Every structure is written in C-alpha cells, then in structure tokens.
Image (cartoon, helix red, strand yellow):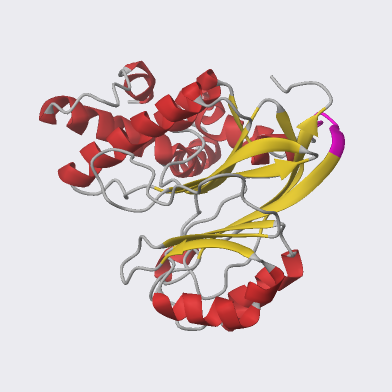
Amino acid sequence: MILFTYLWPAGFRNTSTAFVAAAWAAFIIRTFLFQFGLLLLVITTIAAWKKHKRLALATLPLLAVTLGPAAWQYMPSAPPDVNGESVTVMSVNLLMINQATEPIISEIKAADPDILFLQEYTPHWHEALSAAIASEYPHIRQIQRDDSFGAAVYSKRSFKGRVNTHLPLGRATEPQIRAVVEVDNREVAIYNIHFLPPWGMDYVIETRAQFADLRGRLEAEQLPVIVCGDFNFTERSPQAAALRHTGILESHDLGGWGRGTTWPVSSFFRWIPSIRLDHIYISNHLTCTDCQTGTGQGSDHRPVIARIGFAEQPAR
C-alpha cells in the first residue's frame, strides 16, 4: 500500500476517472500515514507483549516509514539567518459559520502580523474585523462570500501595482489573491490560497487542476514568493513533494518544531490525531526563523504564524 502511494504518478492535469480515483487513494493514504503508524505501533506493542517476535520485527520497517518523518520533525532546526528586515505573516481560516469572532480577533492582535491572510471571509467576519483591526491595516483587499471561499489580505505595507483578487486557478471561480509588497526594500509576491477539499470526484479533479495551475505560476514567478492559506493537503502529499521539487519551502520545516498540525480542532474530530492542512510556503530566496501554530478558538483550523525575511544564503 505504501509503495503504491509513492510509485503512482501525480499527473495533476490527468482527468481520467480511473487515474484520478487511484491518485486520490494514494493521496488519502499519504495523508493519514501517521495515523496508520499509530495503529501499527499498537500492533507492535501487542506482538511484543505476546512474544510474537517475527510479527513485531516485521512492523519495524513500516513504523520507520509511517512515524519516522513525524519523529524527525521534533529535531532542532537551523534555518538560514535573515539578511536585513523580517516580517511576521499570519494565515487564518476563520470558518465561515463561526459567529464567535472575538477569540480569533484577540489572537490576531496578540500575533500582530505585518501581513494577514484570511480564508472563509464572510460579511459578518468583514464587519467584525473592520471594527477591530482595520485601522491598523491601511491596505486591505477582500472578497466577501456567504460560502467557505471568501478571502482577504490585510497588510501594514502598501501593495505595489494591481492586486489580483481572482487569480485563475483551474476552472473554479473561488477567489485566490496575488499581491506584491516590499520586504527589506525588495518586492515579494504574496499569495492567499484556498483550494477545494478533495471530496467527490468533481472536487478532486478540480483541486488537482488548481494546484497544477498554482505550481505553474510559481515556476514562472519572477519575484520571491510567500504563499499562505488552507491548501487541503498535508506535508506528505504529492502536492507538497511537487512544491519542494520546484524549490518552494515550507516555513514550518525551517523555523517550526513538532508536527505543526492545524486541523481539526473542533467537534468530535478533535480527538483524532490531527494533520497539517494550513501552510506558509516561501521561495528559497527567503528564510523563516520562527513558525508556530495558534489556537484558532471557534474555527476548525489553527492559524499559522511565521517570521520571514531574505536569507543570507538561500535555503536548499
């Protein structure tokens, strides 16, 4: 099963039903490898207790594959130093049905980001955030929607040129935002992304097309990039592997510690070992010296906060 997930080609633009169904199966298995590893750990423990040595030994390579990467995330990191100025960026999935706005607003105020990326931005969230923090963020671009795909960028730094609030990714009409700001007197392209969830064949095909278009744009991007949002894929997915191959790094890998999980944090699902769906990606011109997850009270996602600047030596 594990070999299948890594050998099956990604083929993000392939829309064949059979191919996409197999790719989706590989995606789901890779998404929950850590959880499979925990089940294997139970089997290993019982086998050792019952003195079934061969069964216990047989599970060890699988434990290394499933739990090893998670264990490695607890090793100390040594990101490249920042050369000059750095900025704090924060990505928050607000949850469109969340009417209790004060806890997340308090968390935003405590983090005090220079650039704030918001997903699931609705009219009631616009009203609450406008009253609470808009005076501190003179540069705002937002698209309010009554579904889960409104978006906004709040910035203390001015936007350079036109802000694209409907960056075309796939065939979907959900807003994706690209803007340009200055960090240390150098232009940086910032993206606020929210992909469709991978449920149902239509959504699976479309979210794969959205990712393929984003990857193509990042490969062609002339500026250093900061790409934030709710990607609906984890760090072990084929999508994350494709970004690494493109030279796009995850802030958590540079400046974070532990698994850095963000979903789910509400309902009965919060008792299940969580996964990381929310990311802050950067090009290797940049570095991240600190990356943390917040609380996200009232939402089903934890926010991600990262300190980012230009690297003295590009990360690899």
The answer to whether residue 53 shows anywhere in this view is no
Query: Residue extending furthest left?
Result: 17
Taking the magenta stretch, the answer to whether it contains residue 162 is no
**Which residue occupies 62% across, 67% down?**
295
Q: Is residue 123 above or below residue 70?
A: below
* Front position in the image: 283 or 295: 283
- In the image, the segment drawn in magenta is 77-84
Kindly tell me whether residue 72 is visible in this rendering: yes
Above or below for 99 versus 12: below
Please state the horizontal and vertical placement of residue 24, each as a whole percent of the image.
Answer: 26, 35
Q: Is residue 122 left or right of residue 106?
A: left
Q: Residue at x 63, y 74 (%)?
A: 134
Pinpoint residue 308: horizontal percent, then vertical percent: 74, 42
The residue positioned 67% from the left and 52% from the top of the image is 89
Q: Residue at x 49, y 70 (%)?
A: 299
Q: Name the magenta segment's main secondary structure.
A: loop
| Residue 79 part of the magenta segment | yes
Viewer-closest of 130 and 48: 130
- Where does the C terminus fall, quadrant-wise? top right
Q: Nearer the viewer, residue 236 or 224?
A: 224
Q: Where's residue 172, x and y in %?
A: 25, 46
Q: Quadrant of residue 123?
A: bottom left
Task: Work out whether residue 8 or residue 68 is closer to the camera in this orientation and state it.
Answer: 8
* 161 lies left or right of 1: right
Counting from the top left corner in percent of width and height, residue 225 is at 60, 35
